[in-house]
Image: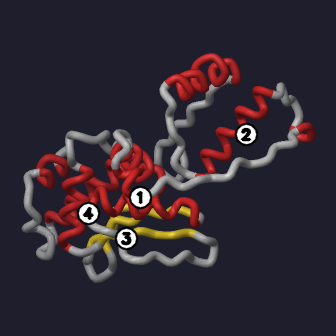
Amino acid sequence: MSGGREQVRVIFSKKDLVTVILPLIKEYNLLFLTSQRVKQFALVNYILENSIIHWDNINFKEPEFIAIPTHDLVNLDFFADWLVGFTIAEGSFGLKANGSAFYQIRQTGDDNLNLLKAACLIIAGKEANPMKADSVGSYQLTLSSKFDIQKVISFFSSPNDHLLYGYKLSQYTLWLTALKNSSRYSQIKGTFIEKNSNE
C-alpha cells in the first residue's frame, strides 16, 4: 500500500512477453497511442529481435512518431475505453475552493496533444480550447463548465464503455456525491448520480 491507497503491480516474465503478449499485440494489430509507448514497443522488439542481453549492446534508433489526427483517434473503436484507462492512470475529478467542479487530464509532449483534443471531442462533443505547454512540456485538458460536467458524467457513467475501478472509481463516486449535494450541480440531469453514489 502507498499513501493509503491499495496498489497492484502486474509483472510479466520474459517468456510471457515473448510467447503471449507480443504475439497478441501483433496478431490483433494493436496500437499504442502515446509517443513514449510507441518508442518503448519499438525498443523491446529491437532487443528481442537482436538478442540483446546488456544495455551496452543497444544501438537503437528511435522511430519517428507520427501522431494520429484528432478525428481519426475519436473514430478508433477502442478510443473511449482507452480514455477511461488513461483517466484511471492520469486523470482527476475535483472541486475548486469556490465549489466549481472539474475533470482534468494531462499529457506530456507536442506529439501527444491530439490525444487531449480527441478526449475533449469524445467526452464533451466539442473542439478543445487552445492549450499551452507548461514549463516541462505538459498539456492539460480541463472541462469545468456546467455543460461540460454533465457531459463528463454521461461519459464516465455510460454502460457502453469500460467502467472506472479502484481508486479512480472511489474518487469519481465521492465527486458525484459532492455534486449531488451542491446547489450548483444538484440539478444535473440523469439518474447516474444516484446509481453511482450508492456503489
From this viewpoint, which residue is outermost toward the bottom? 98
Mark 1 or mark 3: which is in front? 1
105 horizontally vs 44: left or right? left
Query: In the rendered structure, which amino acid carries the disc numbered 4?
Result: Ala
Query: In the rendered structure, which amino acid carries the disc numbered 3?
Result: Thr
Q: Earlier in the sequence, mark 1 or mark 2?
A: 2
Query: In the rendered structure, which amino acid carries the disc numbered 2?
Result: Leu
Q: Which residue is mark 1?
A: 70
Mark 3 or mark 2: which is in front? 2
Q: Is residue 59 visible?
A: yes
Marks 1 and 3 sit apart, C-alpha to C-alpha, by 17 Å
Q: Quadrant where the C terminus lies?
A: top left
Q: Is residue 166 visible?
A: no
Marks 3 and 2 sit apart, C-alpha to C-alpha, by 33 Å
Query: In the rendered structure, which amino acid carries the disc numbered 1?
Result: Thr
Say which mark, if any, is on residue 124: 4
Is the C-beta separation of discs 1 and 2 under 8 Å? no
Q: Earlier in the sequence, mark 1 or mark 3?
A: 1
Q: Secondary structure at mark 4?
A: helix
Q: Secondary structure at mark 3?
A: strand
- Residue 49 vertical placement versus 34 (above, below): above
- Residue 103 vertical placement versus 80 (above, below): below
Q: Earlier in the sequence, mark 3 or mark 2?
A: 2
Tell me what residue is drawn at x 41 percent, y 58 percent.
70
| Whole-percent x, y for residue 110 in the image | 57, 66
Q: Which residue is mark 3?
A: 142
Q: Earlier in the sequence, mark 1 or mark 4?
A: 1
168 horizontally vs 160: left or right? right
